[in-house]
Amino acid sequence: ELKVEQNPLFLSMQEGKNYTIYCNYSTTSDRLYWYRQDPGKSLESLFVLLSNGAVKQEGRLMASLDTKARLSTLHITAAVHDLSATYFCAVDLALTQGGSEKLVFGKGTKLTVNP
Amino acid sequence: ETGVTQTPRHLVMGMTNKKSLKCEQHLGHNAMYWYKQSAKKPLELMFVYSLEERVENNSVPSRFSPECPNSSHLFLHLHTLQPEDSALYLCASSQDLFEKLFFGSGTQLSVL
């Protein structure tokens, strides 16, 4: 059974600082997503990582994937208050079990960036 | 166990069939959602219910019909679907509208 663990679950940081959110998963997967959820809003897709060593960056966020370690990271550089949100990783167990697709979410990391 | 249960886990249906997906949450949440995930694409929000009233419908075709009889149950009624509707359908709930989401395991739907 695929398990996805994020840590930390809660993160409070100062503006201007750097930090990394980790997403570990328990079985082979060929696709990993990062989502952002702002308070009072639905999920917003941030990144889709498709292969080992994939790195994607947008603004102050950079996501990477190491399929051998079954680990993805979301790195925050020089945080600003607007980044305060809950960040979810989700792992796609696709095409490995009878052709069906299963998306498993981590519990989310609630990030608060303080001025 | 996330507290959100979806049935069935897998469903294969013809284009003329009528079927329903069921979602039940045991978390005492007030809001429930249907999401669609097509192959290799991120999630798409379909419907949102808060306190059993629909609050959002993101331009979903009428062949998908949601029903929320109470705050613990959410259905997605399907009729005359198209093959392109084949996808993973995820249910989620949150304590209140658009707070942190808790997801079910999804129903993998194949339309033949």
Image: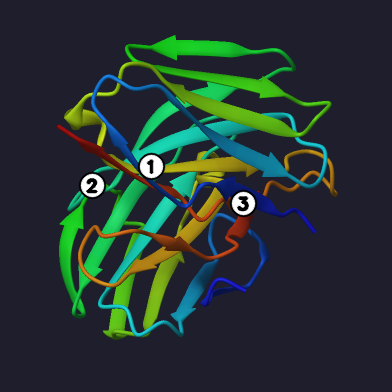
Residue type at mark 2: give it.
Asn
Residue shown at 30%/49% (left/top)? B61
Left/right placement of residue B59 relative to residue A7 reads left
- Helix, strand or loop at label 3? It is strand
Chain identity of mark 3: A
Chain identity of mark 1: B
Instruction: Check disc 1 and report the residue beneath it.
Output: B44
Q: CA distance from mark 2 to mark 3?
A: 23 Å
Q: Are marks 2 and 1 on the same chain?
A: yes
In the image, residue A63 lies at what x, y percent? 52, 21
In the image, residue B33 lies at what x, y percent? 34, 62
Q: Earlier in the sequence, mark 2 or mark 1?
A: 1
Residue type at mark 3: give it.
Val
* Crowd band around label 2 with a 10 angstrom C-alpha radius: few (<14), some (14–19), many (20+): few
Instruction: Check disc 2 and report the residue beneath it.
Output: B58
* Crowd band around label 3 with a 10 angstrom C-alpha radius: few (<14), some (14–19), many (20+): many
Of residues A63 and A29, the one nearer the viewer is A63
**Residue farthest bottom in this picture:** B70
Left/right placement of residue B43 relative to residue B109 reads left
In the image, residue A18 lies at what x, y percent? 40, 22
Residue shown at 47%/75% (left/top)? B23
- Helix, strand or loop at label 1? It is strand
Contact, mark 2 vs mark 1 (Cβ under 8 Å): yes
Report if residue B21 is visible in the image.
Answer: yes
Report if residue B111 is visible in the image.
Answer: no
Q: Is residue A81 above or below residue B74?
A: above
In the image, residue B88 lies at what x, y percent? 57, 50
Residue type at mark 1: give it.
Glu
Q: Which mark is residue A104?
A: 3
How many discs appear? 3
Of residues B100 and A79, the one nearer the viewer is A79
- Helix, strand or loop at label 2? It is loop
